[in-house]
Amino acid sequence: MNTEINFAGIKMKNPVTVASGTFGYGREYSQFFDLSKLGGIITKGTSLKPRDGNKPSRIYETPSGMLNSIGLQNPGVEYFLQYDLPWLKQQNTAVIVNACGSTIEDYVELCRILNKLDIDGVELNLSCPNVKAGCLAFGTSYEGVKEVTSQVRKVLTDKPLIVKLTPNVTDITMPAKGAEDAGADGVSGINTLLGMKIDIDKRRPVLANNTGGYSGPGIRGVGVRMVYQMAKAINIPVLGMGGIMNGDDAIEYMLAGATAVSIGAGNFADPETAIKTIEGIEKYMKKHNIEDINSIIGTVQMN
């Protein structure tokens, strides 16, 4: 069986990656499995300068997923360059850096630095619903996505550029087209849905930021639908995510049009979810006598 794929110019041994914000920079998960088995690692959101993130409480478990309001806490790109990247390069898997910022200038300067690093690609985070300034505003329209992507594309000349899109829009195809028209090599989605949990005894939201990003199995139906819509609307590949817990979930996304997939909240439920997903994909291929995983991408037969 051939499980190798080429996503946006990034060669991967299989279509399974781990989603930004759920895997850190990989060190914690390396004690559970060999990271070289992954198709790729998408790093925690990394900004130009260190970020403290939102005040606690920042996470709440739901019956079918979780709410988070971390706020892109990270040590900044210089720390990543000196401490995390050398370690990641030893793991024998594709390394994609998730880049976040609050202004177009932040994104441009950060990607100017990333363009010089030994990484496999950049995922431009235009979709985080937890930061009051920046990400959400850029990612909700065709014009906003096109503007920031086009500016980044001018400095990110040597690396594949993937744009991560928010599902908190009326029509997901418009931001996707904005990314494509600005020169992106691929898009990823969906990021978290905007959600809220209220403590009925205290009569207050459980998250200090009031709202947060909802992820997990509960959003999978929305994710599959949006990936299908994006794959039909654009000619660049889609990295599908949202509630993937096993191989069957991953195959569903690929049938809908995703070239590759990413495991997010599933990493918290079971740190070996990504490995089990890879094994599940191989089991599916054997069951249906599929020799090449690429042959199923976008082959769903609609009623």
Image: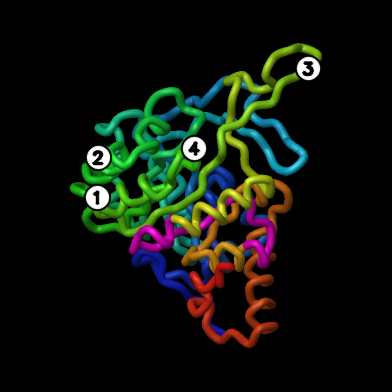
Q: Nearer the viewer, residue 176 or 61?
A: 176
Q: Which residue is mark 4?
A: 168
Q: Position of residue 234 (x, y in %)?
A: 35, 59
What colour-coding does the image apply?
Answer: rainbow
Q: Position of residue 141 (x, y in %)?
A: 35, 38
Which residue is situated farthest in the left direction here?
154
Q: Nearer the viewer, residue 289 or 89?
A: 289
Q: Quadrant of residue 33?
A: bottom right
What is the distance, in whole Å, between disc 2 and disc 1 at their CAs?
7 Å
- For the residues carrying marks 1 and 4, which lies nearer the camera in this image? 4
Q: Which residue is mark 3?
A: 200
Q: Amino acid at mark 3?
A: Ile
What is the distance, in whole Å, between disc 3 and disc 4 at their CAs?
26 Å
Q: Residue at x 58, y 49 (%)?
A: 222
Q: Which residue is mark 2?
A: 147
Secondary element at image label 3? loop
Q: Amino acid at mark 1?
A: Ala
Do labels 1 and 4 touch, CB within 8 Å? no
Q: Earlier in the sequence, mark 3 or mark 4?
A: 4
Do labels 3 and 2 touch, CB within 8 Å? no
Asked whether residue 27 appears in the rendered view, the answer is no
Q: Write the start and end of the magenta stretch as one range.
A: 230-249
Q: Amino acid at mark 2?
A: Glu
Q: Amino acid at mark 4?
A: Asn
